[in-house]
Image (cartoon, grey):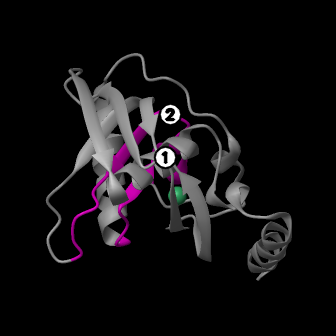
Amino acid sequence: MARELKIYPDPVLKVRGREIEEITQSIKDLSQEMIGIMYANQGIGLAAPQVGASLRLITVDVSGPDFREDLHVLINPELVEQEGETLSEEGCLSLPDFKCKVQRAEEITVRGLDLEGAEKIIQAKGLLAVCLQHEIDHLNGKVLLDHAGRLKKNFYEKKAQKRMQE
Ligand SMILES: [Zn+2]
């Protein structure tokens, strides 16, 4: 069965993803599905919980929109260094019609594994740094909404509940 994008308030979005201990064929298949879903929705990043898999796996590509050529697939990504601050306005494929300003580190180093199990270190700034931090939040059960103020969050929660009932 093909996986699909999970939309807030789907409970899987609030669960901490598990470490991936072995890179099996199903992990490789999952990452291919995530890449497909990310590109099909014109997204720049996707985390496994967003397709219903509670695992520490992300796909990121901030290039485009016409040509996508900067794909990163990261298993068990960890933020190992961060510097500076930046305020970014972000959206999320799992939160339709929502945008919010978030304080992020400006430059980061992320360490994880690629699909062959080799260590992969990404030094990033700008949009890529923001996107990586956003996706790692997802792995910790945190969504963009958790960065918003209480009023803005309540307002969106109500809209999301209404959408569920329709
Ligand atoms: Zn997101």
- In three-dimensional space, the C-alpha distance between marks 1 and 2, rounded to whole angstroms, equals 24 Å
> Which residue is at a point 26% across and 29% down the rendered structure image?
121
> Which residue is at a point 50% across and 33% down the rendered structure image?
55
> Which residue is at a point 59% across and 74% down the rendered structure image?
99
Tell me if 18 is positioned left or right of 113 in this view: right
- The range drawn in magenta is 41-65
Tell me if 45 is positioned left or right of 67 in this view: right
Residue type, mark 1 in image: Ala
- x, y percent for residue 6: 57, 59
Q: Observer-nearest residue: 138 or 99?
A: 99
The answer to whether residue 104 shows anywhere in this view is yes
Write down the quadrant of residue 118 in the picture: top left
Q: Secondary structure at mark 1?
A: loop
Q: Is residue 48 magenta?
A: yes
Write down the quadrant of residue 31 in the picture: top left
Query: Dot 2 surroundings within 10 Å: few (below 14), some, or many (20 or more)?
Result: many
Quarter of the picture holding the C terminus: bottom right
Determine which residue is flagged by label 2: 55
Tag 2 or tag 1, which sits nearer the N-term? 2
Residue at the extreme top: 21
Q: Observer-nearest residue: 17 or 61?
A: 61
Tell me the number on the disc at residue 105. 1
- x, y percent for residue 160: 75, 73
Q: Is residue 55 above or below residue 148?
A: above
Q: Observer-nearest residue: 39 or 164?
A: 39
Residue type, mark 2 in image: Leu
> Which residue is at a point 34% across and 72% down the rendered structure image?
42
Q: Is residue 57 magenta?
A: yes
